[in-house]
Image (tube, rainbow, N blue to C red):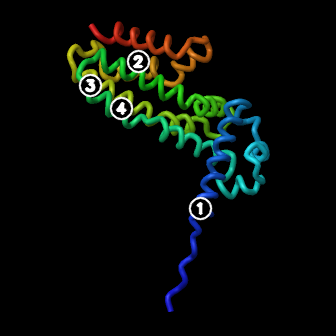
Amino acid sequence: MSPKRPYVSPLRAEGAARTRELILSHATALFAERGYGRVAVADIASAAGVAPKTVFASVGSKSDILYRIVDQGVSASGYRKATDDMLAIRTPEAVLGALARGTRVGNASQFVVHEAIRKALPVHEDGEALWERATAAYRDALRAVARHLHSLEPSPSCSVGETADLLWYWFGPLGWHALVVENGWTWDRAEKVLHRTAVRTLLP
């Protein structure tokens, strides 16, 4: 006699997924507003309207929640398609324009996620690993764009590595945060100035 297969209810699975997304959404908002160190699982549970044990069963510990937020943010940023689109452009200035627009859109759409991560770094038990997890794909994308720029004419006068470093300095999350959050620039102004700075610096 063959063993019985466990019954999986589609409605139950859908409800569990909704609960998980609700918990992650409220956790992201709380981490961004108060800071990771000032938020307890009980706070997340209260905001989501569930019991603390539901949070642990659905998502895990507070650290697990933060890592899920990071992974969702990376996936939702759309960096893969944006990078592929940039690599298809054949003029350097247009590549930099697409990079300014693409990183602006990504940073604006993921602003709350970035704030949650940024505020967690000083107090997280392994802030270095958290930052690497949050930014590795971003940096790889900018390195790919740097290599692409050096395959075009006119190409940057500095090395590929230096070009990648400058792209990170200008278009990485800390650059956008410095202009938009710390200095109160609009996203439009920051995009235009960063694009102009990159063109004037990199292209002869």
Q: Could you tell me the amino acid type at mark 4?
A: Thr
- Give the spatial CA distance, label 4 vs label 2: 17 Å
Query: First in sequence: mark 4 or mark 2?
Result: 4
Please tell me how crowded label 3 is: few (under 14), some (14-19), or many (20+) other residues with Cα within 10 Å: some
Report the label total: 4
Q: CA distance from mark 4 to mark 3?
A: 10 Å
Rounded to the nearest angstrom, the CA distance separating label 3 from label 2 is: 20 Å
Q: Residues within 10 Å of mark 2 (few under 14, many from 20)?
A: some
Report the disc number at residue 166: 2
The Cα–Cα distance between marks 1 and 2, rounded to whole angstroms, is: 45 Å
Q: Which residue is mark 4?
A: 83
Using the image, tell me which numbered label, if any, was put on residue 13.
Answer: 1
- Residue 196 lies, in percent from the top left, at 39, 9
- Amino acid type, callout 2: Leu
User: Which three-letter amino acid code belongs to the residue tagged 3?
Assistant: Ile
Near mark 4 (Cα within 10 A), the count class, few <14, some 14-19 or many ≥20, is many
Q: Observer-nearest residue: 87 or 118? A: 87
Say which mark, if any, is on residue 150: none
For residue 177, above or below residue 87? above
Sequence order check: which comes first, mark 4 or mark 3? 4
Q: Secondary structure at mark 1?
A: helix
Q: Is residue 138 above or below residue 189?
A: below
Give the residue displayed 50% in from the left and 11% down from the top. Answer: 189
Q: Which residue is mark 3?
A: 89
Mark whose residue sits in front, 1 or 2: 1
Of all residues, the one furthest to the front in this rendering is 11
- Sequence order check: which comes first, mark 1 or mark 3? 1
Mark in front: 1 vs 4:
1
User: Residue 54 location, x and y as percent?
Assistant: 72, 56
Task: State if disc 2 and disc 1 touch (CB < 8 Å).
Answer: no
